[in-house]
Amino acid sequence: MTSPAAQRLLDAARTGTPCAPVRDLIGADDIAAAYAVQREQTLLRERSAPIVGHKIGLTNPAVQQQLGVDQPDFGVLFADMDVSALDVVPVAGLLQPRIEAEVAFLLKADLTGDFTADDVRAAVDLVAPALEIVDSRVAGWDISIADTVADNASSGLFVLGPARRTLDEVSPVDVQMEMTVDGEVVSKGSGAACLGDPLTALAWLATAARDYGDPLRAGQVVLSGALGPMVPVTPGMRVHATLTGLGPVSANFGEA
């Protein structure tokens, strides 16, 4: 039987109408309960879309300030969230989308059991530039940490840029990011703004995912968190981000 919190979020996604927060049902600070609600929805969704990775949210102080949340979280990436191959990203199906630029990791080894920071680094195959289109099923982005965790860390879609680099070729902490919308600079940031280092964020995720029973696996992609402030997505907009050492990543959004 689906819990009331999960059902509220599922109904919002199905109808395209944002819902009230779920913290009244699970508590604003009950992280374990929130991940249990996320897991319910994951089990339902993976029946039709394979899991391809994970995302880390709320790693950047600027984004934490935007949303009024003071700690990171994680969610699950499904195959149908990857819109990298699309010339135009449809806005249909998105409720309240926002976009941010990130460093993505492609893994070549599982991260289970006990591991060190060196093990986490060694598990990285390649690094890529990425855009994440975050979304919230909760009306007005009125979220506590429990609301966003339950809502799959406010996941939406993602785009991977064409470049692939090894950690010998690029140091994620040193990456500088600039994102434009229709040619106008709207966000700047750096790898150091992502929990101090995107590799630190990856290590945090590896530990948290393992502890919640869903460890990182070889072949998965990890979005490590925003390098700068996110901005709202509007129909017809053109987004382009450049990450030093990694190159460009772009997304064009369809009309309403």
Image (tube, rainbow, N blue to C red):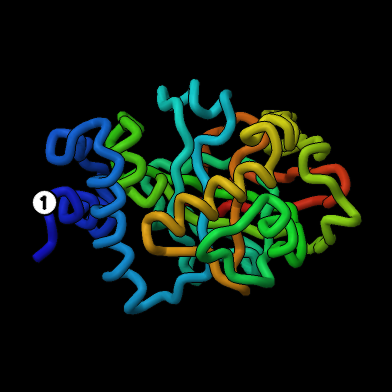
Q: Residue furthest front?
A: 114
> 117 or 142: nearer the eye?
117
Could you tell me residue 133's position as x and y percent?
53, 48
Q: Is residue 58 left or right of residue 135?
A: right
Could you tell me residue 11's position as x and y percent?
19, 55
Q: Residue furthest right?
A: 169
Rendered-image quadrant of the N terminus: bottom left
Q: Is residue 205 left or right of residue 211?
A: right
> 56 or 226: nearer the eye?
56
Q: Is residue 39 left or right of residue 69?
A: left
Amino acid type, residue under disc 1 in the picture: Pro
Q: Residue at x 59, y 43 (%)?
A: 225
Q: Which residue is mark 1?
A: 4
Say what secondary structure mark 1 lies in. Answer: helix
Q: Is residue 127 above or below residue 172?
A: below
Q: Residue at x 57, y 56 (%)?
A: 158
Could you tell me residue 200's position as x and y percent?
65, 42
Q: Residue at x 58, y 52 (%)?
A: 253
Q: Residue at x 73, y 29 (%)?
A: 188
Q: Is residue 202 visible?
A: yes
> 72 or 10: nearer the eye?
72
Quadrant position of residue 210: bottom left
Q: Is residue 20 visible?
A: no
Q: Is residue 101 left or right of residue 72?
A: right
Q: Is residue 193 above or below residue 88?
A: above
Could you tell me residue 28's position as x and y percent?
24, 31
Quadrant position of residue 124: bottom right
Q: Mark 1, residues whose alpha carbon is within 10 Å: few (<14), some, or many (≥20)?
A: few
> 226 or 11: nearer the eye?
226
